[in-house]
Amino acid sequence: MSIIAGSYERFIWGFKLKTLKSTTEQTLTLNQLFSYPAHLSPIKSVAVSGAAAASAAADDSVKLYDLSAAAATEVGSLNDHSTTVTSLSFYTPPNLSFPRNLLTAADDGSVCIYDADPFVLLKTVSAHRKGVNDLCVHPSGKLALTVGRDSCLAMLNLVRGRRSFYCRLGEEASLVKYGLGGDKFFMAMEEKVSVHEAEDARLVFELKNRKRVLCAAPGENGLLFTGGEDRSITAWDTSSGKVAYCIEDAHSARLKGIVVLTRSDAAVDDPYIVASASSDGVIRVWDVRMAIKEKPNPLAEANTKSRLTCLAGSSVKSFRRPQIGNSVPKEEQDAAMED
């Protein structure tokens, strides 16, 4: 499994989560793959799908990486935005190991939709009147949700390449995530997380955290993991709206990223692994099932000594090296989106 993190100091960090076997026990370790100043400004968002990774920053650019190479090299950049790139999301179909699309959102309210093989711009959509705070792609790959600084929620039709829905929320949402099955989505507004039916956006629950929520990740069995100013990892049961369990004081500072990791072989005895990153510079890996009984100790950790801003991770499967192409001519964009 690969984990990458971005920092305020412009550095991108890459780690490989490996299993160490001894005669008495089996442990996990985070082996550093790379670390270097990938951008000219603080990194805002990172994304991983298989061995393809991307980072976005306040320098208006998106960088692409090959995590399968021995040195986990940078393979190119995308420069279609003219302002800070705030959020990234890959879409990978269930039967593929390499992403089909990459979506990027920016501080001017625009969203760029890319074909990921090779990386070419298909369409730029105006999603919000102000900057986009976050975006997520439905598991079907046909829809995406965005929330922005205009206190609105937008839905993008990725088949047509246009905005299909737009509504005012009443307050600004900083995060939006689909559940693993795509039947629900979640929005974070300060210390609250609202749970909605994906079909009609009906509000199901409001989850009230103690302090501001800064990161979230959906898990199996209807769980939603959140972290933020309270320095804890909280697992919410989105069927009942109650806390399932919590890792108190998971870090010494606020959490800036949570990732749910699963092994590609889906072994029955595979621990339920969650990685977390904090602005204290530490990345930790947990078996969250232990939190049901007692406060767990991290299975592995790494100290980057940087102010971390974001985290992403995935299992590394077979890989096709990312190719960087030219933007699709305007007359071809609509046809490409219809295919």
Image (cartoon, grey):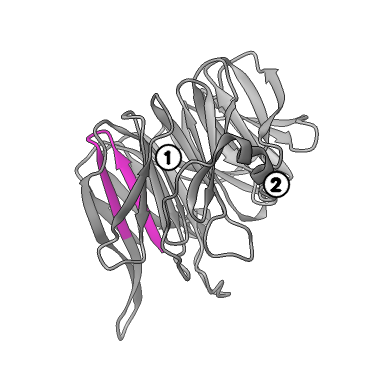
Q: Residue at x 80, y 32 (%)?
A: 200
Looking at the rendering, the stretch of residues picked out in magenta corresponds to: 1-15
The tally of labels here is 2
Which residue carries the number 1 mark? 232
| Depth check, front residue: 55 or 217 | 55
Residue found at the far right of this picture:
200
From the top left corner, tell me how far across and down residue 45 is, in percent: 40, 38
* Nearer-N-terminus badge (2/1): 2
How crowded pointer 1 is (Cα within 10 Å; few <14, some 14-19, many 20+) is rated as many
Q: Quadrant of the N terminus?
A: bottom left
State the image quarter where residue 192 is shown: top right
| Depth check, front residue: 52 or 301 | 52
Real-space Cα separation, disc 2 to disc 1, in angstroms: 26 Å
From the top left corner, tell me how far across and down residue 8 is, in percent: 27, 33
Q: Secondary structure at mark 1?
A: loop
- Give residue 107's mark: none
**Is 84 situated above or below 233?**
above
Which residue carries the number 2 mark? 182
From the top left corner, tell me how far across and down residue 110 is, in percent: 53, 26
From the top left corner, tell me how far across and down residue 130 is, in percent: 52, 16
Q: Amino acid at mark 1?
A: Ser
